[in-house]
Image: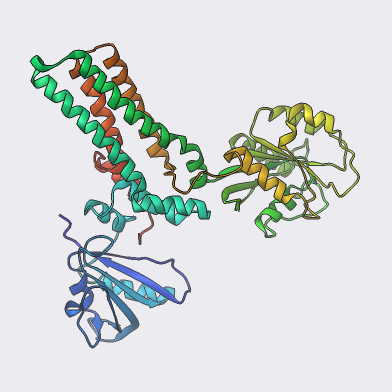
């Protein structure tokens, strides 16, 4: 039973038109009522109504801030508790003064994610829906936002609950046969267990098929832009980011460190890493940048290897092509607006022709071809139907794989006519692993870890 009342700033701190402070708990309404001056008492207000007034200092009775206060009575609120939201003028001083007065009442500062945690503990949402709230906030593309929104609504939860119900039926059948062995027919029981385990494994497999794409849409593709100095790497970053994020000059070695920028291409989020030109150098600072570039290449999911098509191949580029052979790579032949001097036959020894894109970043040519190549590489050219339930959370993916393996063990045991009380162990384990996804079998330490990732006001 949650007995205390919490408060936190629910909007970003800084200058804005309005800032919102959220208060939740059994005493939220009367506690705010003590410092709210208006023509109506909040204790008498109906649920889901907004009231104009002032926050006052309870010691001096001084009016501290002009506010709008929204009242939401339990259980018709996000946390299923009494909730009061105080809208103040957006500014650090205003928010700090009102927050300070609230915390002088019988109200404590909320922990990170505590509002969402209360929504989970009070049964409004399950754990997978709670985690999707983080994804909703951190979405970097419309597609990622849509996937997170479907999970907040419970699409994944329904799929998991459906599979767990099938496993409950299976365990009940096994329990009956354990209690009444005289009525058991081994072949029929084994066949029943295999059918049910196979059915659930099929459902899990369908979810796992979306995992790679879902993870990419959720976290983005770490993409390293590499090549020799002055081939156009920083210009490409600026073009894709639609901003001058990187300094561009004709001087080799201008980029000395790895520059990061998030962009969205064809609804696919990319974490672009503009790297220092990779070459042998005696410059100490540039040498550090080159080493960081090599580390970025090792960590990248995708490599954009940029060549200056107007120059012959350099020895450094031959070494670079050899190093990244077999990696997910798109080759960009830049500066095609100039006479070509590069030996394409050598390039094609290392890379398929489909992965080579002709571009002129300066003339803005070939940008669409690059975007299409990235889509083809990761999504076969197009994303799946909007009706599909994507799995994007690493924790969920790991638990689905564990549950699938437990069911495979149960299936194999039933196929070998292992005693059903032994098979029951694997079936129950799979049921528990699926339950951990939605929070039915999650421990306190896991909950603390998950909700600690939230911001204070969520």
Task: Answer left or right for 161 relative to 4.
Answer: right
Q: Quadrant of the N terminus?
A: bottom left
Please tell me which residue lies in front, 89 or 221. 221
In this picture the colour scheme is: rainbow
Task: Answer left or right for 337 relative to 178.
Answer: right
Q: Quadrant of the C terminus?
A: bottom left
Where is residue 413 drawn, in percent x and y? 28, 15
Q: Is residue 310 visible in the rendered structure shown here? A: yes
Quarter of the image holding residue 342? top right
The residue under the point 29% across, 21% down is 194
Which residue in the rendered view is the most extreme toward the bottom? 39
Q: On screen, 18 above or below 420?
A: below
Please tell me which residue lies in front, 335 or 280. 335
Please tell me which residue lies in front, 393 or 261. 393
Quarter of the image holding residue 7? bottom left
Where is residue 58 drawn, in percent x and y? 23, 81
Where is residue 92 drawn, in percent x and y? 43, 73
Task: Answer left or right for 419 relative to 243.
Answer: left
Q: On screen, 445 above or below 456?
A: above
Where is residue 226 drawn, in percent x and y? 71, 41
The residue under the point 33% across, 29% down is 199
Please tell me which residue lies in front, 73 or 59. 73
Quarter of the image holding residue 396? top left
Q: Is residue 403 visible in the rendered structure shown here? A: no
Looking at the image, how many numbered discs can be counted on the residues?
A: 0
The residue under the point 26% across, 60% down is 79
């Amino acid at each position: 039973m949650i007995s205390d009342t919490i408060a936190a700033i629910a909007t970003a701190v800084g200058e804005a038109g309005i800032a919102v402070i959220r208060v939740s708990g059994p005493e939220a309404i009367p506690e705010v009522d003590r410092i709210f001056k208006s023509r109506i008492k909040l204790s008498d207000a109906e649920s889901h109504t907004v009231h104009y007034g002032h926050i006052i200092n309870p010691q001096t009775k001084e009016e501290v801030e002009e506010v709008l206060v929204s009242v939401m009575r339990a259980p018709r609120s996000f946390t299923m508790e009494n909730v009061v939201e105080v809208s103040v003028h957006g500014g650090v001083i205003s928010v700090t003064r009102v927050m300070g007065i609230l915390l002088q009442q019988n109200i404590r500062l909320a922990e990170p994610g505590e509002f969402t945690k209360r929504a989970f503990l009070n049964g409004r949402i399950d754990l997978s829906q709670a985690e999707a709230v983080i994804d909703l906030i951190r979405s970097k593309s419309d597609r990622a936002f849509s996937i997170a929104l479907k999970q907040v609504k419970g699409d994944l939860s329904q799929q998991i609950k459906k599979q767990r119900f099938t496993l409950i039926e299976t365990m009940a059948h096994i329990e009956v046969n354990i209690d009444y062995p005289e009525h058991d027919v081994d072949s029929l029981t084994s066949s029943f267990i295999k059918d049910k385990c196979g059915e659930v494994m099929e459902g899990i497999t369908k979810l796992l098929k979306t995992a790679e794409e879902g993870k990419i849409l959720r976290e983005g593709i770490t993409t390293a832009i590499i090549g020799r100095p002055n081939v156009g790497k920083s210009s490409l970053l600026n073009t894709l980011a639609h901003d001058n994020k990187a300094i561009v000059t004709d001087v080799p070695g201008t980029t000395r460190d790895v520059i990061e920028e998030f962009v969205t291409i064809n609804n696919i989020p990319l974490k672009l890493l503009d790297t220092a030109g990779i070459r042998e150098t005696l410059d100490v600072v540039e040498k550090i940048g080159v080493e960081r570039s090599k580390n970025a290449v090792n960590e990248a999911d995708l490599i954009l290897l940029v060549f200056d098509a107007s120059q012959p191949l350099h020895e450094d580029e031959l070494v670079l092509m050899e190093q990244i052979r077999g990696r997910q790579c798109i080759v960009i032949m830049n500066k095609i607006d100039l006479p070509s001097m590069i030996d394409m036959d050598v390039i094609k020894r290392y890379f398929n022709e489909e992965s080579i894109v002709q571009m002129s970043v300066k003339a803005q040519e070939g940008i669409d071809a690059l975007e299409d190549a990235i889509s083809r590489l990761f999504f076969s050219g197009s994303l799946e139907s909007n009706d599909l339930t994507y799995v994007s959370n690493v924790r969920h993916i790991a638990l689905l794989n564990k549950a699938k393996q437990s069911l495979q063990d149960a299936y194999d045991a039933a196929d070998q006519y292992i005693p059903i009380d032994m098979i029951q162990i694997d079936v129950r384990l799979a049921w528990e692993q699926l339950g951990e996804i939605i929070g039915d079998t999650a421990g306190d330490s896991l909950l603390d870890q998950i909700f600690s990732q939230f911001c204070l006001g969520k």
